[in-house]
Amino acid sequence: MADITPLRTAAETGLTKLFEATKMKYPTGVSIAREEAFRYFEAVGLPTRRVEAFKYTDLRSAFRDAAHPAEMPSAETAKAAVAQAKGFAGIEAVRLTFVNGHLIEAESDLGRIPAGVTFTPLTRALTEGHALLDRLTPVRQASENPIYQLNTAFLADGALIAAEAGAKVEVPLHLRFIGTGTEAYSTATRTLVVLGEGAEITVLESHEGPDGVAYQPNDALDVTVADNATFRHARLNAEGREAVALSTFSVKLGAASAVETVNVVVGAVLSRHQVYLNFAGADARAVVNGAAMLNGRQLADTTFLADHAATGGVSRELFKTVVDGEATGVFQGKIIVQQAAQQTDGKMMSACLILSDEGQMMNKPELEIFADDVACGHGATCGALDDDLLFYLMQRGLPKAEAESLLVQAFLGAAIESVGHDGAREALIATVEAWLKARS
């Protein structure tokens, strides 16, 4: 039989050239991992709609060119970019600042790292072979994903954060990712977080960049939560309007541990946020929420998977999407209950509010259950604003635009109110209000 050579897009060919030019940047061990990751990506390529996990998000069409990895910005450029950053800006936090995918120590609070927490730049941890790296194997489903493998192949910078056993960290850590420049570029960052037994920590993420620049960020956050530990997380996607933004959040939960996370999306022309949970210990609990506000021709994809592999796990997922203009929302969620995971309690809900005739929402919730003593369910809804409620508010003197805004805020509120940190919650509510004000 004749050999079959798959057709490759300009972006895939460009990625190969870029990888060959940069693959020897790190020591041998890291270079091998990068090589393996890229060969995995090269074998599957950029996913199309024919791949079930990307049924509604065609990355092969979205990536027309391979943007060159961003270089370390000058001190002046980084300082100017930080001065314009708005994400979680008014919150008391320890900030770790990345500009164009590179850690900027001069703009970070490295001297204020809380007691019980250690921070190591990822480039140093990889170069020195940090001992904690062996404990940070990603969730299996994440490691089998081409987006995650692409992040590994082009990994440029990031952070290794460890909270020692019993540490109760009151001040949140703010991972601040800022893009700047006028030419297209790509970034690949990885943050690794390890919580010791009984530790508690809050991590905030903000992602923002320039409008009118087709840059390509790809970030990943891998978290290992030990027994009885608690990880709280809030993420804001306020990327530039032409960005194609990819992100992966993967967590391993120990026994009786807890994870709370919310992802709020207002930016990027196309974004895909992947969440992978592995309930490795008994009686673990996770609350995973999301809120997306889309207009124009934006597409925001949230893909979620909870793998219950131990008894007594509880997972609650609530995703709210508001679609205006010709935008498209996507939710793909799956709860897997392994045979050993008896007494699992999993509930998943996706709700969409469509404000225009041209907007659309794609929902695909799934359950895959191999145990018999479980309480699991899922649901999905799409609809317009309630005319009766709108009429009620307008009859009491509210202009139509203000009445609509109140209803949208109430719709999104359930997803955002779960944020435990007061300042972060208020900042995300302000983001909703700013989006509604711009709409009106």
Image: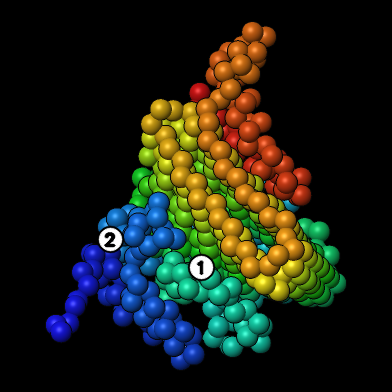
Q: Which dot marks residue 72?
A: none
Between 117 and 47, the one lying in front of the other is 47
229 left or right of 290 in image: right
Closer-to-camera residue (388/20)? 388
**Mark 2: which secondary structure?**
loop
Farthest left residue?
2
User: Would you name the residue on which mark 2 appears?
Assistant: 65
Residue under circle 1? Answer: 189
- The x, y position of residue 246, in whole percent, is 46, 59
What is the CA distance from the residue labelled 2 to the residue labelled 1? Answer: 20 Å
Q: How crowded is the residue under tag 2: few (<14 C-alpha within 10 Å), some, or many (20+)?
A: some
- Inspect the image, locate mark 2, and give the three-letter code of the amino acid beneath it: Asp
Residue 219, given in percent of the width and then of the height, sits at 51, 64
Neighbor class of circle 1 (other Cα within 10 Å; few <14, some 14-19, many 20+) is many
Farthest residue to the front: give it: 372
| Residue displayed at 46% across by 45% down | 362
Mark 1: amino acid? Thr
- Along the line of sight, the residue nearer the viewer: 402 or 352: 352
Check disc 1 and report its element: helix, strand or loop.
Answer: strand
Q: Is residue 266 visible?
A: yes
Q: Residue at x 63, y 68 (%)?
A: 370
The color scheme shown is rainbow
Vertical comparison of 39 with 61: above or below? below
Residue at position x 46%, y 32% from top? 324
Quarter of the figure with the N terminus: bottom left
Name which of mark 2 and mark 1 comes first in the sequence: 2
131 lies above or below 354:
below
Query: Is 326 situated above or below 171?
Result: above
User: Image check: 326 left or right of 428?
Assistant: left
